[in-house]
């Protein structure tokens, strides 16, 4: 790496660390995954924080020249533009959420028509067991029927470990993983997330599961594949090895979560189960390896179809974020989530708390729009080759758009 490129990378890292500190109100933050040079982190943590306006100017300076090959330069410039948009917002610039999302995430996040959710509800009606009550009642009954009993939550890490073994095996057939990889499961309380996959470097990662929430065993592979393999952990590990260690792309260790690469990461996460368990394979594996042990007999439901609907209904969260950005009251947001996402009162409370977390009102848009983007792009004869690209290349949403 040239002296000019190294200096640019240092300035990029400092910009990301400083923006993160501004957003979080501390040096630790929650919108940056940082594995870069620790001396740069130490500098950002020890200095008097620059103003948000100064950070926007720093981003402009970085954009004047990005001293890397063309596609790599465009990838980096897109993330600098995201950092600039956040800095400008922190400095008081008003920008409607769709425009803000376009600057940060590189996608069009316009209002989604409720007809999309009506069609999803019709699919859910067909996928759930027959029963009395509303569609929401039937969904909640299905979830309750597959929920791990609270007194047996201590068994969840073992179940997650079994699911990790199977998802790793299937993922490695697409993109080889190191045989000595270690993935732990940790139950956490007080988190605003349901589950999170954390890559810790080398061959070590941890799956964090929120122990405050009921765990639906029918979702075990859906969650583990998303957060682990071929989702977030697999992507992080493979890109660390192939991009950082082999190609010297050190910017991969500076991952700003409100940038366009996370649209692709979340899209991959939502497609992860279907990638390695096509059709009804996830349901068959769970039935044979997990559900019977807890007395959960087949009930005629279609797990894959239910999870497909859940992915579509992330669009409800996207619309709710737009409503929240307009200043609509929590009562209206709760009613919208209840009507269209079919959430229970407890789930609505958790959803609203999540939307209030740092950066989440923007980040939540990544789920539906990332899933929708990849849903089209992965429908191709070279599907598995495209999955390998998602796991090993630095891609932007624009790279996945149709060329005609």
Image: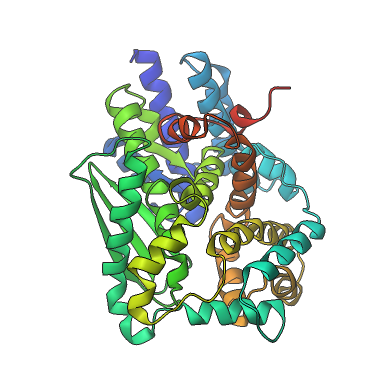
Q: Which is more toward the observer, 236 or 103?
A: 236
Q: Which residue is drawn at 39% across and 61% down?
A: 285
Residue 46 at what x, y percent from top left?
34, 45
Q: Which is more toward the observer, 163 or 318?
A: 163
* Rendered image quadrant of residue 80: top right
Taking 314 as reference, is 67 left or right?
A: left
Q: Which quadrant is home to the C terminus?
A: top right
Residue 58 at what x, y percent from top left?
53, 30
| Tag count | 0
Residue 90 at what x, y percent from top left?
61, 48
Q: Which residue is drawn at 57% across and 23% down?
A: 63
* Rendered image quadrant of residue 175: top left
Above or below, comparing residue 7 to residue 357 in the picture: above
Q: Which quadrant is home to the N terminus?
A: top left
Residue 184 at what x, y percent from top left?
25, 59
Q: Which residue is drawn at 61% across and 70% down?
A: 352
Q: Is residue 29 visible?
A: no
């Amino acid at each position: 790496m040239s002296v000019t490129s190294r200096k640019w990378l240092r300035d990029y890292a400092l910009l990301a660390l400083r923006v993160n500190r501004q957003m979080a109100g501390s040096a630790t933050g929650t919108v940056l995954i940082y594995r870069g040079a620790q001396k740069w982190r130490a500098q950002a943590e020890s200095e008097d924080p620059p103003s948000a306006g100064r950070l926007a100017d720093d981003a402009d300076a970085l954009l004047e020249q990005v001293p890397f090959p063309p596609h790599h330069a465009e990838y980096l410039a897109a993330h600098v533009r995201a950092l600039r948009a956040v800095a400008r917002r922190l400095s008081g610039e008003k920008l409607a959420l769709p425009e803000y999302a376009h600057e940060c995430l590189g996608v069009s996040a316009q209002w989604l028509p409720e007809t999309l959710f009506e069609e999803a509800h019709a699919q859910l009606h067909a996928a759930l067991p027959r029963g009395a009550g509303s569609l929401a009642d039937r969904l909640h009954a299905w979830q309750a029927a597959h929920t791990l009993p609270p007194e047996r939550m201590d068994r969840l890490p073992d179940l997650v470990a079994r699911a990790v073994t199977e998802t790793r095996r299937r993922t490695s057939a697409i993109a080889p993983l190191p045989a000595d990889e270690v993935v732990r499961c940790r139950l956490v309380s007080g988190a605003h997330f349901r589950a999170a996959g954390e890559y810790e470097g080398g061959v070590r990662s941890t799956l964090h599961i929120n122990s405050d929430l009921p765990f639906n065993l029918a979702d075990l592979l859906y969650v583990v594949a998303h957060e682990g393999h071929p989702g977030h952990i697999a992507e992080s590990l493979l890109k660390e090895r192939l991009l950082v260690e082999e190609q010297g792309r050190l910017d991969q260790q500076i991952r700003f979560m409100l940038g366009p690469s996370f649209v692709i990461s979340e899209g991959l996460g939502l497609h992860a189960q279907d990638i390695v368990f096509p059709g009804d394979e996830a349901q068959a594996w769970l039935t044979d390896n997990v559900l019977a042990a807890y007395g959960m007999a087949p009930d005629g439901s279609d797990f894959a179809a239910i999870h497909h609907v859940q992915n579509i209904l992330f669009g409800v969260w996207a619309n709710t974020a737009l409503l929240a950005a307009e200043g609509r009251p929590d009562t209206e947001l709760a009613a919208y989530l209840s009507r269209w996402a079919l959430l229970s009162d407890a789930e609505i409370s958790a959803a609203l708390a999540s939307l209030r977390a740092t950066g989440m009102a923007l980040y939540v848009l990544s789920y539906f729009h990332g899933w929708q983007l990849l849903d089209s792009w992965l429908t191709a004869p070279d599907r598995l080759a495209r999955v390998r690209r998602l796991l090993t290349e630095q891609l932007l949403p624009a790279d996945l758009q149709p060329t005609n």
